[in-house]
Amino acid sequence: MIIGTPREIKNHEYRVGLTPESARELVAHGHRVLVETAAGEGIGAHDRFYEQAGAEIVGTPADIFAAADMVVKVKEPQPAERAMLRPGQILYTYLHLAPDPDLTRDLMASGAVCIAYETVTSPHGGLPLLKPMSQVAGRMAIQAGATALEKAHGGRGVLLGGVPGVAPGKVCIIGGGVVGFNAAQMAAGLGADVTILDRDPEVLERVGTFFEARAKTRFSNRANLAECVAEADLVIGAVLIPGAEAPKLVSREMLGTMRPGSVLVDVAIDQGGCFETSRATTHADPTYVVDGIVHYAVANMPGAVARTSTYALNNVTLPHALHIAGLGWKEALRRDTHLAQGLNVWNGKVTFEAVAEATGTDYVPVEQALS
């Protein structure tokens, strides 16, 4: 199979779909790998490293999309990239379609086979291709929030860890999954006053056992959520419904109960955001203020730590890429029902029910695509 990786063109996106080491593995399995020139510069992977791995360097993204049987990316294809997709071509990347009907319609119109990292499941019920980026984003959320709390960045001027004689900042984390757990680790490590909210008693028990006295847990109902948000210096939105649009849990009205200069970090922004006042931002201009509250809602947070993120991502995406390339997408998905959950768009149809519901498109079961 011919596998191509273009340079990412989203604002301040420095990750790359394949590392030189991943390219070497694919080549060793008999595949041809094309890499757009400078695609790996953001992680320090220069063209010569790919060439040493057996990949071929090509000059333009058009060269990649024209030749590749499978395009391996990191972020969802931008409009110019979507226009180059062709029927039957495999697109293997993060998609996050639920909040973006235009992207969904463009992928349907392309006729491409679109496999989304974020909906591939594991035998244990997790999302293994999303997990490493959730770990990165959760940890980065505290870094970003701590910076936004500084007075020079529009915040209250609160140090999360405090100092002797001065109370630490209060951090409210909505969601105790992978993002929330990693955010709590960072916040607790800094010495902040941390509260984690979740609706799943097993999650609350697990994080409570892990953190013991270093973080508090509360059941996430309307009253507890409102109280926690009102008291917080920093609120982390870490809610995920796989493939679906994130629920809006913090209303604009609730912002009025917060102290001016408090900070909201919406890690769920890829799925539309879990704050009513959220809108996607970029690393070039990451924050904005609504009703005196600083909002951070960068849609590709892990792109800022591109080297760590790329290698963590390739660790989990490469085995499936080898499977798809070796067997063809249809046979690979037939043999692996968990990988089959990643199929979001096929032959102009949406094959993931939550995406179809969120975007108002017709739903076709994955089984029909594989028949």
Image: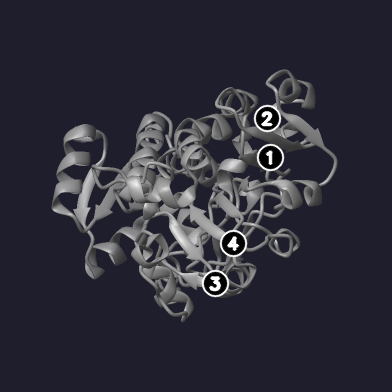
Closest to the camera, between mark 1 and mark 4, is: 4
Query: Which secondary structure lies at badge 1?
Result: loop
The amino acid type found where label 3 is placed reads Gly
Secondary structure beneath disc 2? helix
Per the image, the residue denoted by label 3 is: 348
| x and y, in percent, of residue 295 in the image | 55, 59
In primary-sequence order, the first of circles 1 and 3 is 1
Upstream in the sequence, badge 2 or badge 3?
Answer: 2
Give the residue at mark 1: 14
Q: Residues within 10 Å of mark 2 (few under 14, many from 20)?
A: some
Q: Position of residue 68 (x, y in %)?
A: 68, 46
The amino acid beneath tag 2 is Ile
Q: Amino acid at mark 4?
A: Ala
Mark 2 lies on residue:
43
The span from disc 1 to disc 4 (Cα, nearest Å) is 25 Å
Dot 2 and dot 1 residues touching (CB under 8 Å): yes
Residue at 63%, 62% (x, y): give it. 288
Label 4 belongs to which residue?
Answer: 112
Direction right: furthest residue: 59
